[in-house]
Image (cartoon, grey):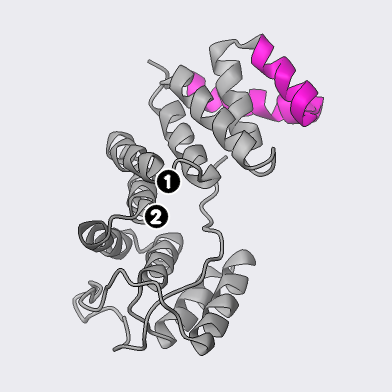
Amino acid sequence: MRGWVWVAVILAGCASQPSQTTPEGTVDTSDITCQEAVQPEQRVDLEMIDTLMGKGRNHAALARLESKPMDGIDYWLRYGQLLASTGKLDDAEQVFRELVLQCVDGRSRHGLGMVQLKRNHVNAALLHLEIARNLSPASAQVRNDYGYALLLAGRYQQAAFELRTALELANGQGPVRQNVAVAYLLRGDEQGLDALKSDYGFSEDELDYARALRQQFGKSEQ
């Protein structure tokens, strides 16, 4: 029901020492900076990594990223995301915590929140995702992920607001379609469901799928 894909952005940093894991299995984050300048050749490398990520080839993207080290924030955001996507949650958390310490950036909080969500630490995830939402209020992805975490916490009214906002920001596209439908179903909001049909062309098949997804929440409600 939720995705975790950052939109491609102009990435940052000058070449530095390779950001590989240490023998102890932790990540060397000493090269992290918050700068966002990027060299033309680095942009090409990172666009290639984005392409791999878009195809779901996260292990290959991580390997390529580690072979093209940089020290700017957007390199490290991708690094943390790829570590999490390939199951290295401890290392991903370390990267995002360091980014949060150094950079006032909604993407860093978003990343840390998503790592906590992957660990099923819903309350911790909500803390970081709420900060990310406040720092990046026009990000459809952040609002969607925050809304999803609110659903998990049983805060359905707040979830519906965040997810409807995400739906509008995303022009009615993406996984938020199912999330907002689930939120309305959990609230018994027939008016909201009718609006999804009229405003965004929700089909009966989509609503049937949302009804099936709702059952995943129903047994763990308040």
Q: Circle 1 sits in a helix, a strand or a loop, which is it?
A: loop
Start-end of magenta stretch: 191-219
- In the rendered image of this protein, does residue 104 appear above or below residue 73? above
Residue beneath label 2, please? 107
- In the rendered image of this protein, does residue 203 appear above or below residue 98? above
Residue at image coords 51%, 24%: 161
User: Residue 219: in sight, yes or no?
Assistant: no
Label drawn at residue 175: none
Residue at image coords 74%, 31%: 206
The amino acid beneath tag 2 is: Arg
Residue at image coords 53%, 81%: 43
Label drawn at residue 136: 1
Mark in front: 2 vs 1: 1
Q: Residues within 10 Å of mark 2 (few under 14, many from 20)?
A: many
User: Residue 39: in sight, yes or no?
Assistant: yes
Q: Position of residue 135 (x, y in %)?
A: 37, 45
